[in-house]
Image: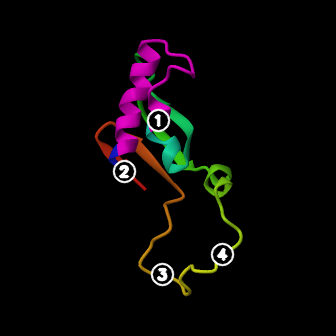
Amino acid sequence: MACFIQAAYLLELDRQEKHDRDAALAPKWWKPLKYKVVEELVDERDESIFGARLELDRYAAFSNLLVVRPSKAPKGNNSSQRDPPEGCYNQKGHTRS
C-alpha cells in the first residue's frame, strides 16, 4: 500500500510539472500491480491533488492469465494467499481499503 501513497504524491508532482502521459511518474507505482486510478481527490482551494481512489484493473489483471495449467504445476488450492483488495482510497500518508 505504500506504493499507492507514493503515487498520490507523484500525481501532484506530475500536475505541478505539467507532465504528459509519457513523462508521468505516478502510473509507474500502480500499473505493475494491475490497479488503475478511478478518481483523483483534488483540494478545492488550490486545486492540488491530495489523494486518489484506485481499484483493481480486471482487464490488466487477467491479461497475463494462463488458462492451461502446466503439467508439473502443484495441485490444490493455496488458502494462505489472499485476494487483492477491490479498491482503496489513498491520501498522502494514509491508506484505507
Separation (CA) of disc 1 from disc 4: 30 Å
Q: Secondary structure at mark 2?
A: loop
Circle nearer the viewer, 1 or 4: 4
For marks 3 and 1, the one nearer the N-term is: 1
Circle nearer the viewer, 4 or 2: 4
> Image quadrant of residue 48?
top left
Residue 12 placement, left or right of 34: left
Q: Residue at x 55, y 17 (%)?
A: 20
Q: Secondary structure at mark 1?
A: helix
Residue 46: say if magenta: no
Would residue 49 be visible to someone looking at this image?
Answer: no
Residue 15: say if magenta: yes
Separation (CA) of disc 3 from disc 2: 23 Å
Q: Is residue 91 above or below residue 76?
A: above
Q: Secondary structure at mark 3?
A: loop
* Residue under pointer 1: 28
* Residue under pointer 2: 1
* Residue under pointer 4: 69
Q: Amino acid at mark 2?
A: Met
Residue 78 circle label: 3
